[in-house]
Amino acid sequence: MHTFLNPLTRLGSPTLDAPTTATTGLPSHRTIDPSILYLGTPVLLISTRNPDGTANLAPISSAWWLGKTGVIGMGTRSHTVANLCRAFECVLNVASVDLVTAVDRLAGTTGSNPMPAYKQAMGFRHVKDKFAEAGLTPLASEGVAPPRVAECPIQIECEVVHLREVGPPGEHSAAIEVRAVRTHVHEAILKPGHRHHIDPDKWRPLIMNFLEFYGLGPCVHPSYLAEVF
């Protein structure tokens, strides 16, 4: 039997005689209020279709997957979210470390015209052709209208299932549930002898770590799950 804690239950404060760093030898902790919790997530380039049929491309770094279902986090005032709410489809192009300069070229751009005041205040620029701005190549998708990014080693065509605003009022954040309908992978990162497996020793995703760009290091330990799946 599983016991679930009532979320309204008050846990109370730590007891005064709790073990200290001096007695346990463990690292000490400090309670802080970080402005962001980007603890290390892959960078994606999300492509959508504009109302006139042209493509929009935007970098995002809040995404996670469970099976074929993904959840991405974005600001509700963005041009990309407007496209998603209208057409309900996108491509999540997963960037590798060698695409970092292309990704960064898009970071201060927006497809919105007129540009929202908050983006003007941040120094954003309106760019109509995001692919040309980043020096990337659009590639026709097979199951959705938005194009893929040819240079991205992993391209996931998705349908939007659900969009829900999250966070306190005024935060303008949304959690967007998507369903993968088709996945394309560069042959160079596939595991030999395994048609549907990506080789983690060959795949080098671009990571957003507290708003800075990072890559992965070498494998630190064999994984039991990698052996059984």
Image (tube, rainbow, N blue to C red):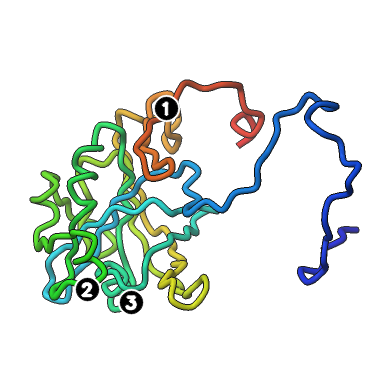
Can see residue 64? no
Q: Residue at x 43, y 29 (%)?
A: 216
Quarter-of-image position of residue 52? bottom left
The Cα–Cα distance between marks 3 and 2, rounded to whole angstroms, is: 18 Å
| Mark before the other along the chain sequence, 2 or 1 | 2
Give the label, 3 or 1, closer to the camera.
Answer: 3
Which residue position is annotated with label 1? 191
Query: What kind of residue is marked 2?
Result: Pro
On screen, residue 79 versus residue 7, left or right, reads left
The Cα–Cα distance between marks 2 and 1, rounded to whole angstroms, is: 45 Å
Q: Residues within 10 Å of mark 2 (few under 14, many from 20)?
A: some
Task: Identify the mark at residue 151; answer none if there is no mark.
Answer: none
Q: Which image quarter is the C terminus in?
A: top right
On screen, residue 111 versus residue 118, left or right, reads left
Instruction: Tell me the SS state at disc 2.
Output: loop
| Mark before the other along the chain sequence, 3 or 2 | 3
Quarter-of-image position of residue 6? bottom right
Give the label, 2 or 1, closer to the camera.
Answer: 2
The Cα–Cα distance between marks 3 and 1, rounded to whole angstroms, is: 37 Å
Q: Residues within 10 Å of mark 1 (few under 14, many from 20)?
A: some
Give the label, 3 or 2, closer to the camera.
Answer: 2
8 w.r.t. 32: above or below = below
The x, y position of residue 104, in whole percent, is: 23, 44
Task: Identify the mark at residue 116; answer none if there is no mark.
Answer: 2
Which residue position is annotated with label 3? 85
Q: Relative to the observer, which residue lies in front, 186 or 26? A: 26
Q: Residue at x 33, y 45 (%)?
A: 94
Q: Relative to the observer, which residue lies in front, 134 or 85? A: 134
The answer to whether marks 2 and 1 mark residues whose Cβ atoms lie closer than 8 Å is no
Query: What kind of residue is marked 1?
Result: Lys
